[in-house]
């Protein structure tokens, strides 16, 4: 039964551990085993413990809140990424302040300024473009990148080169040796790695009929739609992400081409829409849950002042998900 005025001592007595252990758990310090951490948090919830965050912040200098800055929440990949970060953060007693950059550098900069006003302990950031916002320099806490690597920052992301290689190997298995590329923005390393992983995996066996760079938001340029209309003998379109792939399928249909009977299409990310569109999209699945959780862990290590390797990369393997959008050529 929940009751008012629950203290750290009440939790410690119920669990059978010291008050210091309970304090370490509630403050997100990493020096407590997972079993004890889980038990302490469970008992805290059952007893209805409500910490006074304002008092804690005055005492410790920490707000127990982190920022999460994402490029565009209209892209279904990023809400799923945000959910994975929030789930892990909440399990550790952290609040997440979410900023949607809305594809605008100014909004991204304003978002960092807002996070500074709320005195977050650190920021998990998926950069919008190659240039960091000026407000980033004034941020006091640590910054961990997620999904999009940049030099000089700790980062957690998928093995994009591996994903490109898997798609190249799959293309050959399915008999596709002439392809069109709808690559992501050249300014983003994640997009370049996906593209290079594909092109360099089988440089002599796969011919690139055409290539166009398009935004990750799925908005096709005039050059992209014209390339899809003409196709130039390409039997497969390899898209930089799932939104681009879905847009390509719709565009091809408008030009009278059927996927995969007339031309095949692959994506990258494995957003939830890939199971809903027709045909269901063959794509590369990123372990979004693991990426989000690791980014939070990396952030906590830095907030706690632990000795860490300078700007490490945590890279997770990806998986090919074969569905209905690719036809086997005889």
Image (cartoon, rainbow, N blue to C red):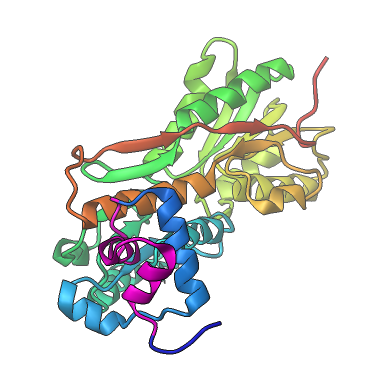
Q: Position of residue 203 (x, y in %)?
A: 51, 14
Q: Quarter-wise, where is residue 26 in the image?
A: bottom left
Within the magenta stretch, is there residue 219?
no
Q: Quarter-wise, where is residue 315 in the image?
A: top left
Q: Residue at x 58, y 24 (%)?
A: 166
**Is residue 212 depicted above or below 92 in this figure?**
above
Asked if residue 17 shows in the view, the reply is yes
User: In the shown orientation, is residue 103 left or right of residue 233?
Assistant: left
Camera-nearest residue between 151 and 213: 151
Q: Position of residue 139 (x, y in %)?
A: 18, 65
Identify the image quadrant of the C terminus: top right
Identify the image quadrant of the N terminus: bottom right
**Is residue 97 depicted above or below 245 in this figure?**
below
Q: Residue at x 38, y 43 (%)?
A: 156
**Which region of the structure is painted magenta?**
6-31
Camera-nearest residue between 184 and 170: 170
Q: Position of residue 190 (x, y in %)?
A: 42, 40
Within the magenta stretch, is there residue 17?
yes
Q: Position of residue 266 (x, y in %)?
A: 66, 36
Q: Residue at x 48, y 87 (%)?
A: 3
């Amino acid at each position: 039964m929940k009751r008012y005025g629950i203290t750290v001592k009440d939790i410690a007595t119920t669990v059978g551990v010291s008050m210091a252990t309970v304090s370490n758990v509630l403050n997100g310090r990493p020096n407590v085993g997972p079993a004890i951490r889980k038990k302490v948090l469970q008992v805290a919830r059952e007893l209805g413990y409500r910490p006074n965050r304002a008092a804690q912040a005055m005492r410790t200098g920490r707000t127990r809140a982190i920022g999460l800055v994402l490029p565009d929440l209209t892209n279904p990949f990023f809400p799923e990424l945000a959910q994975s970060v929030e789930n892990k953060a909440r399990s550790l007693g952290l609040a997440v302040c979410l900023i949607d950059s809305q594809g605008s550098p100014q909004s991204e900069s304003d978002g960092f300024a807002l996070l500074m006003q709320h005195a977050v302990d650190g920021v998990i950031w998926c950069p919008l473009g190659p240039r960091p916002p000026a407000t980033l320099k004034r941020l006091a806490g640590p910054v961990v990148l997620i999904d999009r690597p940049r030099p000089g920052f700790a980062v957690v992301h998928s093995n994009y080169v591996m994903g490109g290689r898997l798609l190249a190997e799959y293309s050959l298995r399915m008999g596709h040796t002439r392809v069109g590329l709808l690559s992501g923005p050249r300014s983003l390393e994640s997009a370049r790695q996906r593209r290079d992983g594909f092109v360099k995996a089988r440089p002599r066996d796969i011919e690139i009929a055409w290539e166009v760079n398009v935004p990750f938001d799925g908005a096709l340029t005039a050059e992209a739609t014209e390339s899809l209309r003409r196709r130039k003998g390409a039997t497969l379109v390899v898209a930089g992400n799932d939104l681009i792939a879905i847009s390509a399928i719709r565009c091809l249909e408008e030009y009278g081409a059927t996927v995969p009977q007339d031309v095949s299409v692959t994506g990258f990310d494995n957003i939830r829409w890939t199971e809903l569109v027709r045909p269901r999209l063959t794509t590369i699945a990123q372990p979004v849950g693991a990426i989000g959780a690791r980014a939070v862990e990396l952030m906590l290590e830095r907030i706690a002042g632990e000795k860490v390797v300078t700007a490490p990369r945590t890279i997770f393997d990806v998986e090919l998900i074969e569905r209905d959008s690719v036809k086997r050529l005889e």
